[in-house]
Image (cartoon, rainbow, N blue to C red):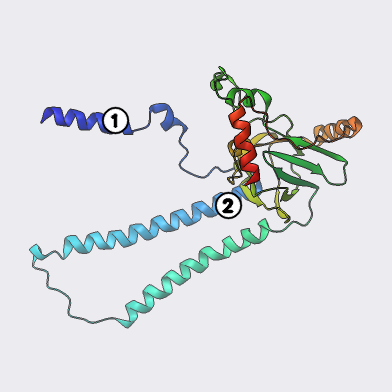
Amino acid sequence: MLKILKCAAAAIAACLPAGAAFAAWELNMPVGVTELSREIHGLHMLIFWVCVLIAVVVFGAMIYSIVKFRHSKGAIPATFDHSTKVEVVWTVIPIAILVGMAIPAAETLIKIEDMRGSDLSVKVTGYQWQWHYDYIDHNVNFFSRISRDSDAARQLNSGIDPTSVENYLLEVDKRLVVPVDSKIRILLTSSDVIHAWWVPAFGMKKDAYPGFVNELWFRATEPGIYRGQCAELCGYDHAFMPVVVEVKSKQDFDAWLQAQQAGDAPAAQPAAIDSQSDNASATTTVARAE
């Protein structure tokens, strides 16, 4: 018996994540660094606590009824058929709760779709497997691909330890640069298959469809570097298509924009991520054909 208990304990321990994994868990939504992300988080927490309150009331009543009116206590089954008043109450209350949650949710949804008053518009085009950024009316555009050190480390038999690469698979050769406290309008499309542009700290994710222009906007209130990924399975190298946005002060952004315009370099042509394996190249070709 003791041996069985030890085996069971070992099996349970093996299924549990290590302490480091527990430390990395984030069970709740991130608050984010944009006004939209904070509103979305606020709605999430509001609805969460409403659900908690409903659960406490419903399960509390159930547990009380089970304990108080159990058969061993001599409880007698109810003889009434129904109560119109009770039915009205338990219909009106859920409707009131749903309406109360729908009003702020609708306000936020309308705000998410309101593209008016943008300070900067950027056309973002998804390619297999990179992004193209075009600063509309500013004559600045470039392709953004996974950084070369991450690309080298991901190759089969590369001999490079991925943990030695800073921001492995979450860094690019050219970042999308935007000013802080400015409404940034993203015009999102694709040149081949469906992609999705996603930055968790912004609270925004939208799909990029071929032949269709989607829109989203964000206003970052804190300078910094924010990382995301393509969130739509788009082919063989889907996992190697990061999104990196650098939020600068308005003065630094203006200086960056002037430097980019002064460079006047021709935009690179889209190309697939380099592969050091003939098999990987063949698979990439098949994925594109499909």
Q: Are marks 2 and 1 in contact (CB under 8 Å)?
A: no
Residue displayed at 23% across by 31% down: 9
**SS class of the residue under badge 2?**
helix
First in sequence, mark 2 or 1: give its number. Answer: 1
Please tell me whether mark 1 sits on a helix, a strand or a loop. helix
**Residue at point 58% right, 26% down?**
154
Q: Answer with left or right where residue 247 lies relative to residue 164.
A: right
Residue 23 appears in view:
yes
- Residue 260: percent from the left, percent from the top? 86, 32
- Gap in Å between the C-alphas at discs 2 and 1? 36 Å
The image shows a total of numbered marks equal to 2
Residue at 45 percent of width and 36 percent of height: 25
How far from the left and from the top, in percent, is residue 266? 87, 34
Residue 20 location, quadrant: top left
Residue 33 visible in rendering: no
Question: Looking at the picture, how far across and down is residue 212, in whole percent?
Answer: 72, 56
Q: Relative to residue 263, is residue 170 drawn left or right?
A: left
Q: Residues within 10 Å of mark 1 (few under 14, many from 20)?
A: few
The residue nearer to you, when weighing 277 against 148, is: 277
Q: Quadrant of the N terminus?
A: top left
Amino acid type at circle 2 is Ile
Quadrant of the rendered image containing residue 223: top right
Q: Which residue is mark 1?
A: 13
Dot 2: few (<14), some (14–19), or many (≥20) neighbours within 10 Å? many
Q: Which mark is residue 40?
A: 2
Residue 103 locus on image (x, y percent) = 57, 65
- Report the front residue among 259 and 279: 279
